Image (spheres, rainbow, N blue to C red):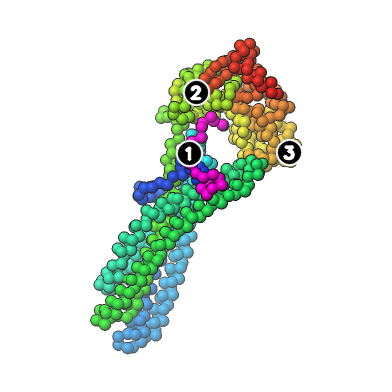
Amino acid sequence: MKTEALPVNNPVKTKDFKGTKIEDRFVYQDDEIIDKAFDWKQFRRLFTYMKPYAKQLLPLVGLMTILGTVTKLTVPYLTSLAIDKAIAPADGNTSLTLLYSLTAAVVILYLVQWAASVYRIKYTNIIGQKVIYDLRSDLFKHIQKLSFNFFDKRPAGSVLVRVTNDVNSLQELFTNGVVNLMIDCVQLLGIVVILLLINWKLGLAVMVTVPIMFIISTKLRQRIRIAWQDVRMKNSRINSHLNESIQGIRVTQAYTQEQQNMRYFDSMNLTSKKSWDKASAMNQAFGPMIEITGGIGTFILFVMGVYLIQSGELTIGLLVAFSNYVGNFWDPINRLGQMYNQLLVAMASSERIFEFIDEEPRIADKPGAKPLPAITGNIQFKNVVFEYEKGRPALKGIDLDVRQGQSIALVGHTGSGKSTIINLLSRFYDTTGGSVLIDGYDIRDITVRSLRSQIGIVLQDTFIFSGTIRENIRFGRLEATNQEIEEAAKAVNAHDFITKLPNGYDTQVEERGNVLSMGQRQLLSFARALLANPRILILDEATASIDTETELKIQEALKVLLKGRTSFIVAHRLSTIRSADNIVVLDHGEIKESGTHQELMNRKGIYCGLVEAQFRYL
């Protein structure tokens, strides 16, 4: 439904489209970098999505993780035994039998490690995808509940990127990241213990570089996190522009603005690339830092190791094992650095996801709200005031009393408040002041679902979903039978054109029903509304896009459809509302006139002027 709210996107003054800053033509309120410290509370909240699968993850995957780590840490020790006991023993007696036995043991350990790894990867990927499924479902379900004001200030592409890109960026974290973190932590702990057991002096000397590396890396953390947030923001703008470009492709081509649009996209694309390059470069800084630190550690190892061998405190085999353990020590350190980067990317996305999930719908059932019983259709607007923006009222003290079965036409210039009245009746917004009552019930005291289930709406811009004609009509009442669907179509004179389609009611239509004419789409929306069998029917410019012949057919159908139902008709084509029981003339949010067509024409007021002006230009 269209609204009369002013756009709340904040235009930023930049250069002309032909300049270099057109990627910032509009900055949306949700496209701001969230500049705050790493939030451990949010981190824990993100991982609550893994809690339902903890029983699957910890026993089996945990066992495979420990098994794989133990086998990996055992290999260097067996290598030291092979050198000190079989290849170059202190007594000089080599032992090929022992060497072959140790070699076989190493091969078996590698096979066990491989099998454990295959099992672990398989099940962590399954669990990770389940977590992503749950997160995406929760996000989509919550978005479905959000009020119109939320969508008024956000482009569709910006919402889309949260459900797709931001959720997708968490896949690696949940499928491999968490388990790899467990593996690396267990491996690090095991290596530290083994190094200290082999020779605590050499172990401490090698690990002296770890605090240095930690201090340097912490200085990069905040910058990296903000850089990845900036990447998400730029991608969000690209998605918003893509959605806008696709929806408006006809206008773009009609005004031959393809080149201009391409330049605009190229500018946004280039900005996104630069943002990614910057974040990626910061990520890559961890690798060289680990290598340099590892090189210093290796230098310390061999200098001090040679000294310890000469002093008899260390054997050659243990030095080789020590070297292998140190090599294995820096690998998980490097991966943990990359894991931290991955976590920062995930945090940047999760902040944007939870920002949406934490958005409270302004229109929600209050505590203790009761379902609205079957209504007769008596409606009252009592001193209703409404503001889309504070200080700019769209309605000013509206008083309107509608009896059941009456048809009320709302007319007036654009911005007079017609659609706002409809929005408040359907409770897409709540009144700023005053109240709206249906059969004596304040609509704020009843459940939203029970209210809207008894209201049918037909809009000027009819939305047709991808699917069949039958499915689109059934959207009004999902449990309707095929016979009921066809009867609804016949009642609004849609049956004839539907049966002439290639597959009749089973004809597939694409998004927005582009294979249908505007008049045909409107007829389907009438059938959809009729099938819902509402007590209150709203026609918001419902005949604006229909040709005269089709309009005459619909007018005939409406005489039957509106009988016994309370109806609100918003129309600019005043010829369609002559038979309304009451015509309400609005101007700047106030009711200026009301009455039947003839009464208002005799009054020679605003309505009469509108009618005469319209027929003057026919």
Query: Along the line of sight, which residue is nearer the eye, 527 or 463?
Result: 463
Q: Which residue is mark 2?
A: 395
| Residue under the point 33% across and 82% down | 85
Residue 63 in sight from this viewpoint: no
Q: Which residue is mark 3?
A: 501
Left or right, 233 with reference to 222: right
| Residue under the point 62% across and 31% down | 460
Residue 584 in sight from this viewpoint: yes
Left or right, 81 with reference to 617: left
Q: Which residue is mark 1?
A: 10
Magenta span has 8?
yes
- Provide residue 547's location: percent of width, then percent of height: 71, 29
- Provide residue 446's location: percent of width, then percent of height: 47, 26
Instruction: Report how far apart the C-alphas of labels 1 and 3 lie in the structure.
Output: 46 Å
Mark with earlier residue (1, 3): 1
Instruction: Report how far apart the C-alphas of labels 2 and 3 lie in the structure.
Output: 45 Å
Q: Main secondary structure of the magenta part?
A: loop
As drawn, the label of residue 282 is none
Disc 1 + disc 2, Cβ < 8 Å = no
Dot 2 falls on a residue whose secondary structure is strand
| Residue under the point 36% across and 50% down | 38
Q: Label 1 sits on what residue type?
A: Asn
Instruction: Report how far apart the C-alphas of labels 1 and 2 lie in the structure.
Output: 24 Å
Dot 3 falls on a residue whose secondary structure is loop
Query: Along the line of sight, which residue is nearer the eye, 503 or 111?
Result: 503
As drawn, which residue projects farthest toward the bottom?
Answer: 92
Specify start and end residues of the magenta stretch as a single range.
2-22
